[in-house]
Amino acid sequence: MRFMMLMIPRGYESAEPGAMPSAEAVAAMMKYNEELQKAGVLLALDGLHPPSMGARVTFEGGKPRVTDGPFAEAKEVLGGYWMIQVKSREEAIEWAKRCPASANEIIEVRQVQEFGDFPPDVQEAAAGFEEMQKAQKPA
């Protein structure tokens, strides 16, 4: 089972462009990342720049509209993620609990939808999806 652990740092929605975590926070997080890697559960991980450097594309009325960050209505935004592969939701939660997060950070744990989770009609509509996933190249 694949799970995405989403880091949601409170206050990051208003962080200035180029805001970076402290060296101490990064060192603690790297130790945690190494534990995930050594346990053989880590598939991918990345940190994200603040929303002030991002954009949102909405489709109200069927037409794309681009809004540059920061986003006034945002209350929670992603700061980064881990993709892990574990045996259960409980194991994913146990890994999240081990993260050296600060008091202003939340980790949301979400299971990835696997192709086989979908009913036959949805699998048919998504024909070629698995091949598309396999063909992805790391950036």
Image (spheres, rainbow, N blue to C red):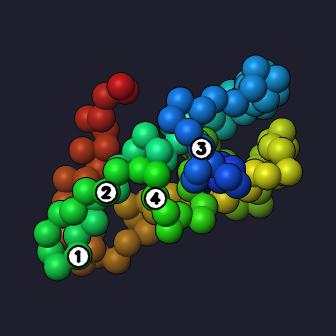
Which residue is nearer to you in this view: 51 or 34? Answer: 51
The residue labelled by disc 3 is 15
Where 121 falls versus 50 (above or below)?
below
**Dots 3 and 4: beta carbons under 8 Å?**
no
The residue labelled by disc 4 is 71
Crowd tier of the residue under label 3, counting other residues whose Cα lies within 10 Å: few below 14, some 14–19, many 20 or above: some
- Mark 2 to mark 1 CA distance (whole Å): 12 Å
- Amino acid type shown at disc 1: Glu
**Dots 2 and 3: beta carbons under 8 Å?**
no
**Horizontal relation, residue 57 to residue 106: left or right:** left
The residue labelled by disc 2 is 67
**Dots 2 and 4: beta carbons under 8 Å?**
yes
**Horizontal relation, residue 128 to residue 76: left or right:** left
**Residue 25 image offset from top left, x and y in percent:** 79, 29
- Mark 3 to mark 4 CA distance (whole Å): 11 Å
- Mark 1 to mark 3 CA distance (whole Å): 27 Å
- Amino acid type shown at disc 2: Thr
Residue 60 badge: 1
**Residue 95 image offset from top left, x and y in percent:** 78, 46
Tell me which numbered mark, 2 or 3, is placed earlier along the sequence.
3
